[in-house]
Image (cartoon, rainbow, N blue to C red):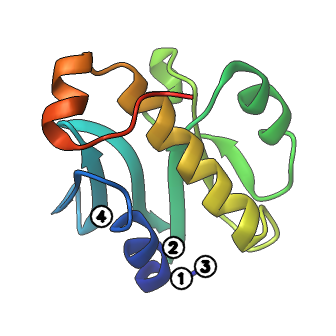
Amino acid sequence: MNRAEFNQFCATFPAADHVVQWGNSDVWKAGGKLFAVCGWADGADAFTFKAGEIAYEVLQERPGVRPAPYLASRGMKWLQQFAEDGLTDAELRDCIRQSYQLVTAGLSKKKRRELGIPEPE
């Protein structure tokens, strides 16, 4: 997945907002809450997303995937794919989708309803 494909995919989520910050990173939020970032790692695109407990433990063992700098160091369960040998495009899309669901599940029912975000599964 490249940066353009990442942005196109993230834009498909209800109430997803895009901003460019943190040194030209593409940052995606829903309801004001971060769910995905595409920035740089050693000159290549790096994709950062929130993960559930099990996914966090399992996926960080994959080549090209690591606990996300800054976020994981603060005890949060965020991962970063920093090399092409990490996740397949389909796996990365699934991880971003899960990140969106984890983040939006933390919003109030009222906020989700106002933003048109489906109820958590």
Secondary structure of the residue carrying tag 1 is loop
> Do the CB atoms of the residues marked 4 and 3 lie less than 8 Å apart?
no
User: How packed is label 1: few (under 14 Cα within 10 Å), some, or many (20 or more)?
Assistant: few
Q: Nearer the viewer, mark 2 or mark 3?
A: 3
Circle number at residue 25: 4
Query: Label 2 amino acid?
Result: Asp
Residue 107 location in percent, x, y?
28, 21
User: Is the residue 11 above or below the residue 34 in the image?
Assistant: below
> Do the CB atoms of the residues marked 1 and 3 lie less than 8 Å apart?
yes
Secondary structure of the residue carrying tag 3 is loop
Q: Which residue has dot 3 on it?
A: 1
Residue 120 location in percent, x, y?
48, 27
Q: Nearer the viewer, residue 64 or 33?
A: 33
Label 2, label 4: how many angstroms apart (C-alpha)? 9 Å
> Do the CB atoms of the residues marked 1 and 2 lie less than 8 Å apart?
yes
Q: Which residue has dot 1 on it?
A: 2
Q: Which residue has dot 2 on it?
A: 45
Question: The C terminus is located in which quarter?
Answer: top right
Q: Residue at x 52, y 45 (%)?
A: 49
In the displayed structure image, the side of residue 52 where residue 120 appears, left or right:
left
Q: Nearer the viewer, residue 86 or 11?
A: 11
Query: Label 4 amino acid?
Result: Ser
> Do the CB atoms of the residues marked 2 and 3 lie less than 8 Å apart?
yes
Residue 44 location in percent, x, y?
54, 76
Mark 2 / mark 3, whichever is N-terminal: 3
User: How packed is label 4: few (under 14 Cα within 10 Å), some, or many (20 or more)?
Assistant: some
